[in-house]
Every structure is written in structure tokens, then in C-alpha cells.
Amino acid sequence: MSGVMNMMESLREACPDNASTVAIIVPVYNEESILESQLVPVLKILPSGFRILVVENGSTDRTKDLLNDLEERYPALDSISLPLPNYGLAMKVGLIKSRADIFIIDDLDVLDTDFWIRGLRLLCTDDVDLIQGSKVLAGKDDRRPLIRKAATLTLTFLLRSLLGYRGTDTHGPKVVWRDAIKDIPPRCQYELDIFPTELVIRAHKSGVRIREIPIHLREIRVTPLPLYKRVPRALRDIWYLHRSLSRRGWG
């Protein structure tokens, strides 16, 4: 019980004084095996003003039924269901629907409360709008297989060379002031896996002040999409995004 209270107090103290509500946006797809074990411990430590918004998209297992059950048990949980699998659209819908002062964007298999606290503390300063979690900056704390680390470095190179992004990651968890990005999600042209990248690139080009901090990864399940499929699709999407935004501009 003391650990729960300590974490609750840490989240409460980290939150900026001028923010009364925080929404933790979590896209999910076919996550019945880890849904309850991941969500319930976090729901138990959320202080007043914090809510989790789960955006289920196209699940074919019992994810939706489990979410309905958890919503009845935990008042701090909300959910939205979309008809088709679409990670980027799920994130986009969550960002547009929520009216919280601060967004925390995270994946179900991560839910890194330490990152949330560090991000919220940084938002208390006056020189940053968006905290981006970076796998590259994790260094020795990145315990993923070497091939996945190499894939991340390749994508980072393309982000810099094709999209002009000076950071190292766009897909990690985020903590961000809603007012800083509220006009950006509706302007994003791409969904699926590339949406987080377009969101961050557009934020960067729009003058949103971004700071990266390392995240500490621990994988608790096999990724739903194998690496040999994810990397070619990511390379294709970054190229399409580069070509599209070069042609149409950032409006």
C-alpha cells in the first residue's frame, strides 16, 4: 500500500500547478493477454485529475469485453473503439477527443510511470512543450536485440536526412501540453505506424519546443508485427512522408 501511495504522490507532485487534468492515451489491438495485468496496477496509483483513455482498434480477441469490464471497476478508465486495426488513427482520435491539459502517450506494453514523472517535471519549466522518449538515448538500458537496435538507428538516420528532424526518436512515449499540439493532429495526413512520426515532425516544424529523454525498455511480449515487416513499411512510410510534405508544405 505504501508503494501505491508513494507513486500516487510522485505523480501528483510532478504535475505542473497550472494543469488540472492529465490524459494517458493508450492505443490497443488484440491485447487480452496483458490488458488487465498492465492497466490495473497503473489505475490503482493514479491521483485525482489523471485518467487513462484506451483507444481499442479492430481487436478480434476479448480486448473490448475486458475493457468494458475494467471501465465498470475503475472510474479513471475511459475507452473508445474503432472498427479497424489502425495504430496511428487510434492515437489521432485519442488526441482529438481528449480535452485534458496534458497528454501522455504510451503503449500498453510499456506504461513507463518513471518516464511520465520525469516528463511532467520537465513541463513545469518554461522552456519545453513536448517530452519525447528516446530508445537511442537509453544506451545500455536498451535491452532489445541488436537487430532491433540497428533498425532504430537506421530509422533515426532517415528522420534526420529526409525529414530534417534533429532528434533521435519519434515513436517513443510522449508527455505534451495539449495547447502546444492541439491543431496538429487534424492536419496529419498519414495514419497507421507513421502517424507518431508525422505528429512530431509537424510539431518540430511548427516551433513546438521538444526535448528528448531516455526510456528504459523491457519487452513483455513479442511485437505484434514482425521486424521484417515493420522495417520495410517504416522505410516506405518515411519516404512517402518526405515526398508528400516536401510537395505540399506543412500546412
Image: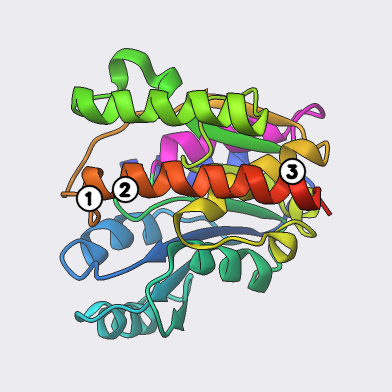
* Percent position of residue 188, x then y: 68, 59
Residue that mark 1 sits on: 223
Image marks 1 and 3: residues in contact by CB distance under 8 Å = no
Image quadrant in which you'd find residue 113? top left
* Percent position of residue 123, x then y: 70, 35
* Residue type (three-letter) at the residue carrying disc 3: Ser
- The numbered mark at residue 230 is 2
> On the picture, is 175 further left or further right than 61?
right
Residue that mark 3 sits on: 246
**Residue pictured at 69% horizontal, 31% vertical:** 210
- The numbered mark at residue 8 is none
**Residue pictured at 37% horizontal, 84% vertical:** 72
> On the picture, is 130 further left or further right than 77?
right
**Residue pictured at 30% horizontal, 25% vertical:** 149
The mark nearer the N terminus, 2 or 1, is 1
* Residue type (three-letter) at the residue carrying disc 1: Thr
* Percent position of residue 28, x then y: 36, 66
Q: What stretch is highlighted in magenta?
A: 112-128
Tell me the distance, in whole angstroms, between the alpha carbons under discs 1 and 3: 32 Å
* Vertical position of residue 195 compared to residue 27: above or below: above
Return the residue nearer the eye: 130 or 68: 130
Residue 114 belongs to magenta span: yes
